[in-house]
Image (tube, grey):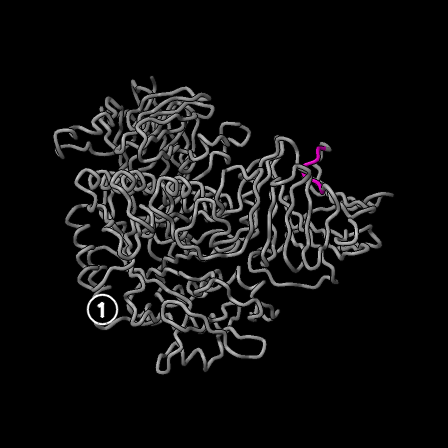
Amino acid sequence: MGKLSKSFGGITRYQETNQGITFQSEECFGLIEFWNDSICRVRLSNEPLTAKHSYAVCSDKTKCEVNIGDESDQLKLKGKSYRVELSKKDSKLSFIDHKSTVINKDAIAATWNGTEATVYKSLNAEEKFIGLGEKVGPLNRRGHAYSNWNTDKFAYDTEQDPLYLSTPFFIGINGDHFYGIFLDNTHKSTFNFGASTDRFSWFSVEDGEIDYYFIHGNSIADIIKNYTWLTGRIELPPKWSLGFQQCRYSYYPESEVEQIATTFRDKNIPCDVIYLDIHYMEEFKVFSFDKNRFPNPERLVKSMAEKGIKTAVILDPGIKVLDGYNAYESGIEQDVFLRYPDDELYTGEVWPGKSHFPDFTDPKARNWWQSQLRFYTEMGILGYWNDMNEPAAWGQCLPNIVEFHYEGEATTHREGRNVYGMQMTRATNQGAQNQLNNQRPFILTRAGFSGIQRYAAVWTGDNVSSDEHLMLGVRLVNSLGLTGISFCGNDVGGFAGDASPELYARWISIGAFQPFFRAHSVVDSKDAEPWSFGEEVEQIARNYISLRYKLMPLIYSLFWESTRNGMPINRSLALNFPLENNTFKEEFQHQFMLGDQLMIVPVESYKDYVNVWLPPGNWYNFWTGEKYAGNREIVLDCPIWKLPVLVKAGSIIPMQKLTQNLDQTTDELHLHVYGQVNGTLALYEDNGNDYGFKNGNFSSREIQMNKNGISISKQEGQYSDGFSKLKIFCHGFKVVSATINDKPIMSQSAVINHVKSIEGVDSLSQDKGSDMEEGNIDSFTLPLGPEKIDIRWAN
């Protein structure tokens, strides 16, 4: 590579290890090692390899069979599903399946350029790339480049990169082959998928070694399952955190918070969480309450709980430099703050003024943070919103010489920055879990790194009230899901600016189907509660928030599934339809699945009609039951009160009666089944609040459907406070006769209105949504106990 860049050169020696090899080339020390049948780790360094800490990887390699062959020109490591070939001439790597098809290979030899290391991959003509998490741009990353460097950017542009969170993991679609690459290096990294060159794609790190995990699978789902096996999966959140959450910068004093909560209840708009932003603090000091604005926070938290609403508080990492402030004085005493090499404390300016910052890569600092958290947990606060944790400081240029403990490996800001927010959130998570008497906390973060899903939900930061940001938010959530962060969302209505009534209505209808559902708005903006945009928008908001609560059996079951296999809640069509070209077209790239059942079609607020792509198979209109053949495009109307939602044939959708908060229970489970084709559902229940499910206090059941009926498995687990009645609604087919466990049962005719029509607002608003109704549906009602149930029908 000439005089400026050094290639790794030829192999000079190698040694077999457990499930792999170590090797040395002219300019590199390397390791290739299978971690399971699907994952192979590759380490490349200009220094001898030593054990190193990973914040992202939480699984150890598992035993798998690897056969190593030494040929004249290459070394071969053969695993169960693919082999790795290492060229002796130039250290290039190839990943090849057992049919001798190249899945992925180096285009040219990897290089060093100063401290920067780069790997170059062949770029095939039709190869597509998805993932990288919180990244702007299209679903298919081909032709674009991105950097990973956690960045605080208020009111970010729709082309802004980087943003708040870094997940250096992508999925490649190479013909009908699928692979993933996770780069485990927390320095600033760059991924280029053919921007400015079509010779190769490449990824690089500014410093440190190349340490990547190659993942092969038969589907996108296989890749995600293995990536989340490696980096962890979400914890089962409290059910209330899946309800509607209302936030503003800021609600104060106490009386305003109480009034907001009371208004939700008076207007019968479901709500589970209200947030306190930084104005609850005294002089913006974390671990404090302003005694004038919030004279009795314990009473407020209790009063909110009595209304069925949880209180969440914002936490910023900056600790004000102020004598007499306990957090500052104890932090100094316990030596938990970031320092310069000359041992002077780093001081940056944020909301409280001059502040020090805990070094969350030091276990000592995390333990200190947990002890400070008792200030809130002893009040019964269950929600913790970690903000400003990129870390942010005015000027946005923390000096690179600032030192981080990094679990004893001692490094600088260059390597520590990208995991700062993750480790703050880790400390918050562990403190809340330890102190809340078996209650599940809700933890939210803005910044993070791969593996953040183990500790918190993620929101996409300071977005803008615009249709462009509405649609960008959909792409960000779908992309985060592809990188294991399944609990995520964006600020409904947009944080910066003032949403129009139409924009708010459209945004809240889309947000109702996303994992994290919170409305939020900036200081000095117009009121942005559901009732702030006129009566029509209030009814639309009530409709879609209420629908989410009725869909909670499905949503909660999807979260449980994600804890087990890492599958996202919102699923880009690339997950199930990666070989369909329409999946990646700009016109259709926003469409996503809620689980495998519902297809949501996001659309801008100003559109009344939208072109929709129906993937292969049959589909049903969620509102009317109309059936559509798939593998084609159709046009659907989408007035502001009607978001296009379709149901995949074979879907089993569990629903419940409406509640005003998710601590309320209902005894009746509704199963909506679509089409007489095969379908399955894993249904999960528990009390939604504590960790009793880990000791058997849960209910899980497998539900299977075919053309002849439905089978509901015997309950697994001891949870006994769940649904006791079952209603089954048959969409798309009629039933002449039916039996339950061989006993005849009569059907009833039902009419389904998932939302209410928008009526009586003015002379132009009569009966809006009256066409969102499905009638003449056969339904069955029966008791629901823990035993197996077989339902058979005839047409």
Q: Amino acid at mark 1?
A: Phe
Q: Is residue 91 above or below residue 326?
A: above
* Numbered range of the magenta stretch: 101-106
Question: What is the quadrant of residue 13 in the picture?
Answer: bottom right
Q: Which residue is mark 1?
A: 294
Residue 170 in the image: above or below residue 640 = below
Which quarter of the figure is the C terminus placed in?
A: top left
Residue 221: horizontal and vertical position, in percent? 53, 39
Rate crowding at label 1 as few (under 14), some (14 to 19) or many (20 or more) other CA atoms within 10 Å.
some
Q: Main secondary structure of the magenta part?
A: strand
Position of residue 48 in the picture relative to residue 782 (left or right)? right
Q: How far from the left and from the top, in percent, is residue 33?
A: 70, 51
* Residue 203 among magenta residues: no
Q: Closest to the observer: 175 or 349?
A: 349
> Which quadrant holds residue 781?
top left
Residue 54 versus residue 757 in the image, above or below: below
Q: Is residue 687 visible?
A: no
